[in-house]
Amino acid sequence: MKFFNREKEIKEILSIIEFEPNFIYFLYGPINSGKTALINEVINNRLDNDKYVVFYINLRRYFISKYDDFIALLFKEYSEDKKPLELIKGLIKDSPLIFGIPIPKNTLEILLSKNEEVNVFDYITNLLLDIKKEGKQPIIILDELQKIGDLKINGFLIYELFNYFISLTKHKHLCHVFCLSSDSLFIEKVYNEAMLNGRAKYLLVDDFDKETALKFMDFLSKRILNKTLSKEEKELIYSYVGGKPKDIVYVIKNMKTDKLKEILDYLLNDAKQKLDMLLEVLDYSTPKVIVGDKEVEVKKDDIINALRLFKEKYMINKKEIPTPVYMYLVKKNILFLNPVEGTLKPQSFLIWNVIKRIL
């Protein structure tokens, strides 16, 4: 299906790519707001194949418990008897996109051996330099970077990685680096990280505003249902799911076989049951969150009081909710934290509707 909207964000990313690398860029937003779809649209349909080489590393689907797990996901091993640059030239004939960083067979094992002085980051840097000499601009994209946030190897791996990215962007101006994450607690931690001050920038990919959401419904209904929705139908959909792209797609697709109100009530009831269960569990256990170096208990009454703040407002200042409480609600995907603006809101209109009904 043809990509819809996001022209503002696309222009911003293309503008970044056109200049020499100078910052690490973090693309963040609520769950299912379209971050990965946006970056894929840029890579597959908006880049000049002759100018760029894009290494896309997707961490979202894999369990990463140790350093070797991460390295295995970072690279893609090839059995061809070719040098790395020759491998890349063969892979980018039709598209600048490469999944993982190509490496000849057995080379990774050598790089990871304790007796080998040249580490994996040196290998990547030399490969990027070779690409640059060929007149192409390398780009690295890591999707769901927070998956390695707590992984340790001589200290936290994430800090080693940030230092390396700073070297690639701010110091060597060698490679663009984009990191995607829907974990807003991770982004908050990154945003407040002193080592990234002046070295990182943040791009919000949010749910659609109302005007765009209604246009998206028109866009989908013509292609999926072969008809135009009435103003009342679109307003009803928006009142339930707001501008969440994934939810709007779900509703329009199911309108081929089911009645609109039944679809919307199903979504609302599903979200309600999940929040009900979360609150019921709190009657039998007291969750804990790590704030700084301390483990802090979060009480059910404090959670309910925090949720009540959203009965009349969709967005509030994060200072209105105690830090341990909003951390718990963000971790449970009930709230979305925007650390750049210092605000909190429900992860979706559906959740907001449920909060208003339950409380």
Image (tube, grey):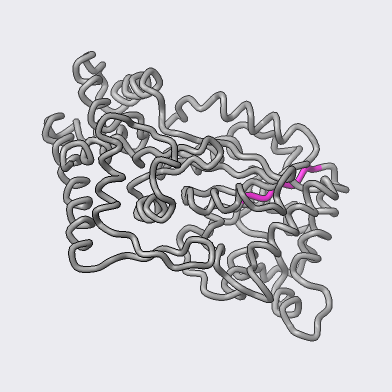
Measured from the top left, where is residue 116 in percent x and y? 81, 81
Task: Look at the image and tell me in which quarter the N terminus lies.
Answer: top left
Classified by dominant secondary structure, the portion drawn in magenta counts as strand
Task: Please tell me in which quadrant of the rendered image residue 160 appears.
Answer: bottom right
Q: Residue at x 38, y 45 (%)?
A: 321
Measured from the top left, where is residue 57 in percent x and y? 59, 56
- The answer to whether residue 158 is above or below residue 185 is below
Task: Please tell me in which quadrant of the rendered image residue 218 appears.
Answer: top left
| Residue 53 visible in the shown view | no
Left or right placement of residue 5 versus residue 15 in this view = left
Measured from the top left, where is residue 201 in percent x and y? 66, 40
Q: Residue at x 65, y 53 (%)?
A: 193
| Residue 109 visible in the shown view | yes
Q: Which residues are magenta?
A: 136-141
Residue situated in front as seen by the camera: 277 or 37: 277
Left or right placement of residue 199 versus residue 9 in this view = right
Measured from the top left, where is residue 93 in percent x and y? 69, 45
- The answer to whether residue 266 is above or below residue 107 is above
